[in-house]
Image: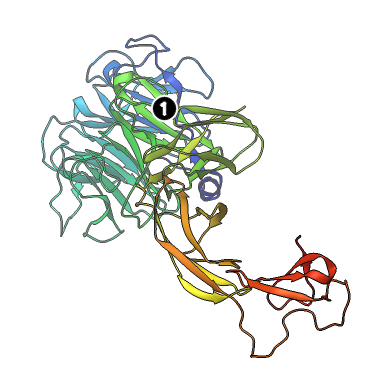
Amino acid sequence: MKKVFSLITLFLSTLVAISQNPNGITIAGGNGQGLAANQLTGPEGMFIDNTGNYFIADTYNHRIQKWTPGSTQGITVAGGNGNGSAANQLSYPRRLFIDSIGTIYIADKGNHRIQKWVVGATQGSTVAGGKGEGWTPAQLDNPTSVAVNKRGEIFITDVSSRIQKWNPYATKGVTLPSSNIQLSGLTDIFLDSLENIYISQRNQNRILKQLPNTSEWIVVAGNNGYGRASNQIGAPEGIYVDQVGTIYSTDLGNRIQKWYSGATTGITVAGGNGDGNAPNQLFNPLDVSVDPLGNIFVVDKYNNRVQKFETTNLTASISGSNSIAPGQSSNLVITLTGASPWNVVVNGIAYNNITSSPLIIPVSPAQTTDYTITSVSNSSGNGIVRGTAKVTVTPCPSTKATIDGSTSIYYGESVPITVYLSGTAPWSVTLDGTTYNNITTSPKIINIVPTATKRYTLTSVMDNCGSGKTEGIVEVIVKPNCLPDGSTVAGDNGYGSLPNQLSWATKPFISKDGSLYIVDQGNDRIQKWLPNAKVGLTVA
């Protein structure tokens, strides 16, 4: 196994690790190239032991450096005596493995050998290769990685496109069979606790897995060509596999990809922001490891440093995709986790001291806009941002209102005027001086009770997009109510001056609206009787 932790702690890491802080912390190197104790030069591999110490293959300084957590400089524990093939020297060490008692196994690439350094030793012993560059069973050809199982069997990849297995004290290795895939471009090897073998194939842009005592390989990540899509790995180098089968891989796209067991796509958990030396950037990452808490460690070769990307439960997710008309508003929903108060930046606008989740942000864009969270932070630092909300502004259809309903009625009856509407609801219309607001369905029925024959027109129609066109005229003819011949329509309550009486009535006149005007000469007045009225009104 390349990096070893207990079953309990590794399983715990899958529960604790919610997401990674996008900004890494330099835990080794980062002080430029050099041989000083606080420097690294072109590091290519690392291993975290059971006590949490970091062992780094300081490749171009030909040494292995041990950094304890929180230290500002490393200690040389192997090599460090210049580039050479002596027992106390290394030549471009590339990868390393540490067993349960602290013994270091080093892929000493330039010397074509595997060196074993016990704790406290000042020189190493050759346990594989060391007989010059070659591809015979006793030789190694620029070994690229090494792993050791619990029986002490050593597994080695080299540039001769093979995996060599060396038993303890053996003088030659055995090439592991591959029955279904021609191996090439092997850059790293990892043995999990079940002794499944994982290898990275740089030139095929994929990760392979072989079950114990089999010869077939299964593609478990990548294999979709070189690229930066989520289903691709670009020239993978270092790999790490946790206890539940989650794969972490370096990617020449300056990112670390995380592939859950059985997944067909990966998730970027570190880097992915172009090459550079900013905290959220990597420059040619060559190895990756994960500690029991789920913190990710990356050997950042061209930046001469090792970066730690810590786990965090601080996240901000955005939702609220919607389609609106011009002038309408829509709500973005920002869901936050972790300790409050939070600070969030959405499309360049900062929202600070947020104390409750979700945060609702109303927006009214003039045109279709994608909204993303630029950053989220709290007192512990920066967190993870997720998602995009797209608010689509749809051009308004033409707004129009047409009325219909010309008819004839008797005085006192109501008539429905139908208003047909097009455009985007809600509408408001003005009919004969009266405005009707918040109309949500078409047609709209407006009931009126005219007192006289009249023509009705719409004077305006509006929706959220503005004013529209009005059409149509409704004419309502009001007819007087007709009674049977001989019916009394006024008076007939005896002689007198009460409103329901008349005295010497004469000269009746009927107006267009059906009102009856009578000269009540005995009472010196003019009485107006509305249709069907029981009493008259004195109008003169």
Q: Quadrant of the C terminus?
A: bottom right
Residue 230 shown left or right of residue 421 in the figure: left
Picture residue at 35% right of the left edge, 55% below the top: 263
Residue 120 image point, x, y percent: 45, 23
Is residue 291 at least partly visible in the picture? no
Residue 168 image point, x, y percent: 31, 44
In this rendering, the count of numbered labels is 1
Residue 323 image point, x, y percent: 41, 50
Above or below 523: residue 138: above
Residue 486 shown left or right of residue 429 in the figure: right
Task: Check disc 1 and report the residue beneath it.
Answer: 55
State the image quarter where residue 357 is shown. Answer: top right
Q: Quadrant of the N terminus?
A: top left
Picture residue at 40% right of the left edge, 53% below the top: 245
The kind of residue on which mark 1 rests is Phe
Picture residue at 55% right of the left edge, 55% below the top: 438
329 vs 420, nearest the viewer: 420
Helix, strand or loop for disc 1 = strand
